[in-house]
Amino acid sequence: MPKPILKIALDVPLDRLFDYLSGGLIVQIGQRVLVPFGRRSQIGIVVGVADSSEFAIEKLKPITQAFTDEQPLDVQMLNLVKFSADYYQYPFGQALLAALPARLRQIAPATSRKQYAYQLTDLGQQADVELIAKRQRVLRSVLAALQTAKQLTEVELDAIASTARKAAKALVNLGYAKSEQVLAAQRVPAILATPEPPLNNEQAQAVASITKDIHAFKAWLLHGITGSGKTEVYIRLMQHVLQDATSQVNTAQKPNIQNHGAQILVLVPEINLTPQLEARFRARLPQFTLVSLHSSLSESERLHHWQLAQSGVAQIIIGTRLSIFTPLPHLKLIIIDEEHDSSYKQQDSMRYHARDVALVRAKRLNIPVVLGSATPALESWYNAVGNQAQSDKATFNQNQANKYGLLSLKQRAVTAAQLPQIDCIDTTKVNLQQGLTPQLIAALRLRLARKEQSLLFINRRGYSPVLLCSACHWIAACTRCSSKLVVHLGQRKLRCHHCGHEQKIPHQCPSCGDADLHPTGHGTQRLEQTLALLLPTARIARVDRDSISRKHALVDILDRVHNQEIDILVGTQMLAKGHDFPNLTLVGVIDTDSALHSPDFRASERLFAQLMQVAGRAGRADKAGQVIIQTAFPDHALFNALRRQDYESYANDLLQEREQVQFPPYVFMALLRAEANDYALVQQFLQFAFEQARGLSNEVLVYDPVRPQMERLKGMERGHVLMQASHRPALQKLLKHLVGKIRTQAIAAKVRWSVDVNPLEF
């Protein structure tokens, strides 16, 4: 009888599986195993079993260990990662292992804290609570609770009394109860439940439309202006799904603590949005177990939360992009908040887009997915509205139209809240005071007098973006990147925000020796300093990557804002979305003009979304809001649309431009990137790839190899080849053959190369 051959995925840069013998161990598909690999041992995942191998059976090695105490990965997750690896042209083994918590990639059993659940025996079911002495109040309460609930976890016992666990163990000793080890959520501080606000007509219509088809796949684009109550729509949908599933579980004869009937995955673009959403969900849905998954968690916390999700104990999972690969056995709904955000796109390793993977996962599970945004990505907008805004209907492929259901929220959820007034100040016609216009300074003083709060937005951290010599115009440049060094005056350092290189600020110009060196331009640190001089009584807080490096620093600052302990916030895009400050009535935007003339065709789309988001922080309660934008181009079409808060018209205009020049979403693109210490190697590699790609397909346009705008990054010389096709299958077919050819070439081992399908940045 032939021995079974295990097909195992390993974290190595080879797009293949490895054959091993079971060694007499019983393993399942999805099981984590330890295998010998060369001179070392490595963690792998069993993804298949075969009767034969292309290698001689005597040459195959047996696995060293199988972690049979751990729950194996489900087939749905394995298939999703396999699809993503194939689509994004990345080795399956590396993609699969990268999707796991760090503890599961280490050569050790992945153990979590031991948690127990208690349930009554037949003797306990028949026991009379009144026969227990009245002085044993906790013991009586636990027995009564178990007779009602059938099963209680340690977390639920803690809610009864601090000594309830001890009482449960006493019941076990009496033979009234038995215990079993389970995964259980950590106890979180009780949050005061908030009342359910009434839905306006638009919100009610959105909820009704989605719940009508809640048991089938459908992609919904929830387009709502800032402050329109998209989160409330999410909560109502979650209530509907979870309560419906809970009622079904409760009617079952044998309820199981590991099966709560339904799970919901909520994706957020950035970590700093999770605390606010967590608090709101816990307040409105306190009866359901919620966990978060993001990089700010410790390794043990992330493993525990991941296992809670994998086992089905966690019913609400909030996470950043990697969470899309979390095994969720009872997933019934996916919500993607701020779906337009570029943070959903992974920019190294497997360059997947979490939004696109979520759509694939939802379709395979036949469940709905909700994409929420005030400024949807043009690809999503195109899929929702089709080509209705285009002039030439004949050129449009009707199969692409109206893939998504479109739901619009055009009014603010708080009845008294109005959209803010947006004013664009022409910086060429006024005298700036330390980079601020007189109008903005006057508006800040007015808010201080009214005891209202202000937010100044500048998407550039540090003190100044450039150190300039006034004599010879020398500029401090990074020696490792094609970029300028940013002045961090407080630390007396010049720092590269791309590679992290640091050096001291020179006392004189390295080029001409002149001592007249000037920090030029503004960053968050300089703006904070300027405000402290202009408004000495104001309480100012800065929010950027430098100021919130400490854990919980951002939460602390946001709490101070809500407690009216801060008058003016100075920050980057971290403050542009997701935050609700009722007393904030003024938003000032500093220096955004560079994006208007960027070579990146997506720059204006991103700028409009960013400005709409940050403008939406003003006037979200019953106080009128104002937005002041400083620009040298106040009559630009982008600012005209922004003043009208008219995303639809601006998006439709951009779609017309994209169609005329054949840019996404009208075509599909892939970028082959390469970098090395020597650009000659990059040239040789890209030339080979270019010639191969040209000969592989007549349906794909392959551009000549070029250097990107940032030619050198972190000491590596860079180049790329762009490929473009009008049909996705044609591009995928070419990439599959091209990547296969590249992997066989010796030159591929001399450069660092990658494929970026549907790139967001060039």
Image: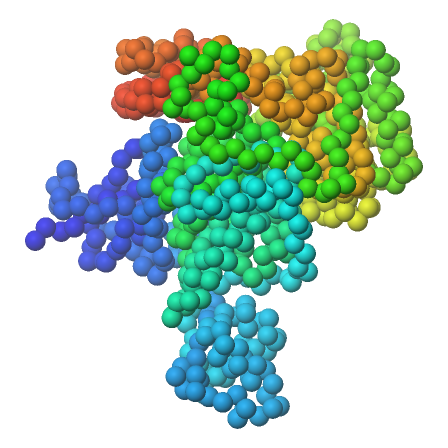
Q: Is residue 242 visible?
A: yes
Q: How many callouts does the rendering have?
A: 0
Decide which of 229, 360 is in the foreground and name it: 229
Residue located at (53% from left, 12% from top) = 657
Q: Is residue 96 visible?
A: no
Which of the 4 image quarters holds residue 324? top left
In the rendered view, does 392 fall on the left or right side of 254?
right
Measured as percent of width and height from the top left, residue 549 is found at: 66, 41
Decide which of 299, 263 is in the foreground and name it: 263
Decide which of 171, 618 is in the foreground and name it: 618
Which residue reaches farthest top? 472
Residue located at (79% from left, 30% from top) = 626
Which of the 4 image quarters holds residue 644? top right
Residue 353 against residue 580 in the figure, above or below: above
Which of the 4 image quarters holds residue 727? top left
Which residue reaches farthest left? 1
Decide which of 229, 287 is in the foreground and name it: 229
Residue 249 against residue 465 in the figure, above or below: below
Measured as percent of width and height from the top left, residue 58 is found at: 13, 46
Residue located at (74% from left, 6% from top) = 472
Measured as percent of width and height from the top left, residue 108 is found at: 39, 55
